[in-house]
Amino acid sequence: MIIAVDGPAASGKGTLAAGLAAHYGLAHLDTGLLYRAVGLAVRGHLDAPDFEVRAIEAARALDAAHLTNLRELTGAEAGMLASRVAVIGEVRAAMRQYQRDFAHRPGGAVLDGRDIGTVVCPDADVKLFIAADSKARMERRARQLEARGEVVDRYALYHQIEERDARDMANPHGGFYQAADAVLLDTTQLGIEAALQAAVAIVDKVMAGKVRGS
């Protein structure tokens, strides 16, 4: 079983994807970490004339060893850098096969990101699109950062999220929008446990429908 979980930054998709993977005993890949790792690899060259070339090279050289420093990878800077490199078509192409291979491992997997249900795994058994308003997403990310001991400027963080949404929506190579066959789950008013219960119910309903239709 392949479950695709998409949605904007800080919508809760990563937490829900990890919860779904644990619930169904599946492997989990946070595909955003791939782009964050590439962004961090070229952060010293943002204004360089060969920025895109460097980003493509970093993407092609990426492996699991680059995904171990979760504290840095999940920081606000890495998120903004990810949106800078994700608009580069060759970077996305370099990431795509890795993600597809992960998804089609024996037993299946849960992948979360921006374009899993639309581009990476259009054949996923279940597709969820996780949404939440900008204020709720800002507050969640702020609490996450504060729990790690970081000082958070909520005003700046809110505008970073809005800016990233705008960049993601304008990305010609991404899939920021909900797939036609994805189920929308708005988590604005939901806590983690309630959101996970809702996500599990969606997966169970979709899979039950597939069994009846087979």
Image (spheres, rainbow, N blue to C red):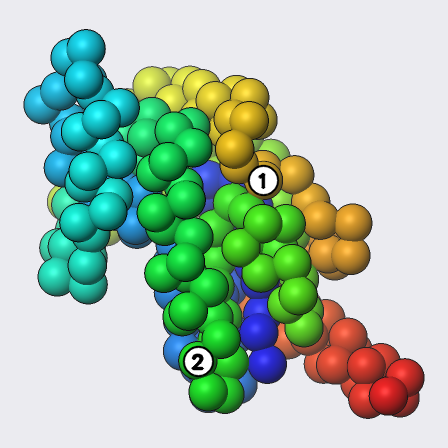
Left or right, 121 with respect to 141, comes to right
Quadrant of the image for the C terminus?
A: bottom right
Mark identifier at residue 197: none
Residue at 34% x, 38% y is 91
Which amino acid type corresponds to the residue marked 1 in the rendered image?
Gly
Q: Is residue 50 left or right of residue 130?
A: left
Q: Residues within 10 Å of mark 2 (few under 14, many from 20)?
A: few
33 with respect to 48 (left or right): right
Label 1: which secondary element: loop
Question: Which image quarter: residue 207?
Answer: bottom right
x, y percent for residue 136: 52, 38
Q: Which mark is residue 175?
A: 1
As drawn, which residue projects farthest toward the left? 44
Image coordinates for residue 96, horizontal then vertical, percent: 43, 52
Give coordinates of residue 75: x percent, y percent: 23, 40
First along the sequence among labels 2 and 1: 2
Q: CA distance from mark 2 to mark 1?
A: 23 Å
What residue is rendered at 46% in x and 40% in y? 9
Residue lying at 41% horizontally and 41% vertically, measured from the top left: 92
Amino acid beneath label 2: Arg
| Of residues 193 and 93, the one drawn nearer to the viewer in this rendering | 93
Q: Is residue 151 above or below residue 191?
A: above
Badge 2 element:
loop
Query: In this orientation, does residue 112 appear?
Result: yes
Residue hosting label 2: 105
Q: Who is closer to the viewer here, 112 or 157? A: 112
